[in-house]
Structures are given as structure tokens and as C-alpha cells.
Image (spheres, rainbow, N blue to C red):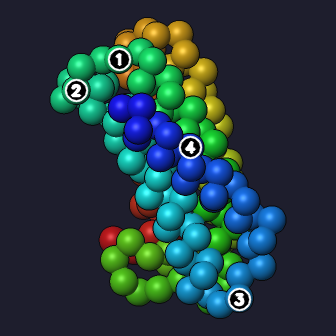
Amino acid sequence: MKRLLVASIAVLAALAALPAAAQFQKPEDAVKYRKAAFQVMSAHFGRIGAMVGGKAPFDAAAAASNAEVVAYMSKLPYAGFVEGTSGTEKGAPNAKVWSERAKFDEDAKKMQDEVAKLSLVAKTGNPDQLKTAFGAAAGACKNCHDNFRNP
């Protein structure tokens, strides 16, 4: 578990340095950046989901640590949503990201707010409150997926 945390922190540090240098040379660079940020976020969110879903034992410290990573990572991928990076393949952002950018940004902010709340709740160590906050965060994620991501 400690090795995983150290590896996650190393990835976070590398990704944190990217926004300053996020003058993407090619659209593919932006896609790689946002996919990497979402992948780290998803891995840590999934660990909390396993706990609240009863598939993994509840561990308050691990929940808090994972929620903190999710909250931090939630701010990073949006720099990678640049014109010319939508696609038709499954899971790619659809063209509505750009045609409805204000709504997309609003939904992104809602997700960031919900995962920030999740991080605060996780620090209380209360599994019931964590489950509620996780549900709200998952709903915010799903909303964006439903509206702006190819099925």
C-alpha cells in the first residue's frame, strides 16, 4: 500500500508539472495528458467505490488518502480538452464539449466540488457519510460522461 501511495505521489508530481508546460505541441499530446489524469483519478475513485460497495474492507485512512488524490486530480484533465481532440471512438469526448463549452465547464466544476466534498467527508472516517458523498461524486462524473462522452 505504501509503495502504491509513493508511486501515486510520483505520478501526481509529474502531472502537476504538466499544466505549466501544457502548451501542447500536437492534439495527441493533449489527449494523452487528459487520459493520464483521468486514469489516475479513476483508479483512486474505484478504490473508494470498492469500500463503499462492500467489495473491499473499509479503511478510513485509505479512503481519505484516495479521496485526496481524486480531489487533486480532478483539476488537471481539463487543460487537455482543446479543440481538435474530440473523436468518434468509444469513451472519447464528443463534439458537444466544444459546442456546449459553458455547460461542459459547469459540469466539470460540479464534479470538482463533489470530489472536494468527498475528500472532506473521507477525513471524518464515517463510512455512511462516505457512501453518501461517493454517490454524489459518482453522479457528477456520470452526468458529464452521459452528456459529453461517446458511449
Q: Which residue has dot 2 on it?
A: 56
- Which amino acid type is shown beneath numbered disc 3? Gln
- Which amino acid type is shown beneath numbered disc 4? Ile
Residue 48 position (above or below residue 9): above
- Counting from the top left corner in percent of width and height, residue 113 is at 65, 37
Q: Name, please, the residue furthest toward the right.
A: 20
Q: Which residue has dot 4 on it?
A: 9
Q: Mark 1 or mark 3, which is nearer the start of the sequence?
A: 3
Frontmost of labels 1 and 4 is: 4
Instruction: Decide if residue 79 is on the left or right side of residue 8.
Output: right
Mark 1 secondary-structure assignment: loop
Mark 3 secondary-structure assignment: loop
* Mark 2–mark 1 CB contact (< 8 Å): yes
Q: Which residue has dot 3 on it?
A: 25
- Which amino acid type is shown beneath numbered disc 2? Ala
**Between residues 103 and 68, which one lies in front from this camera angle?**
68
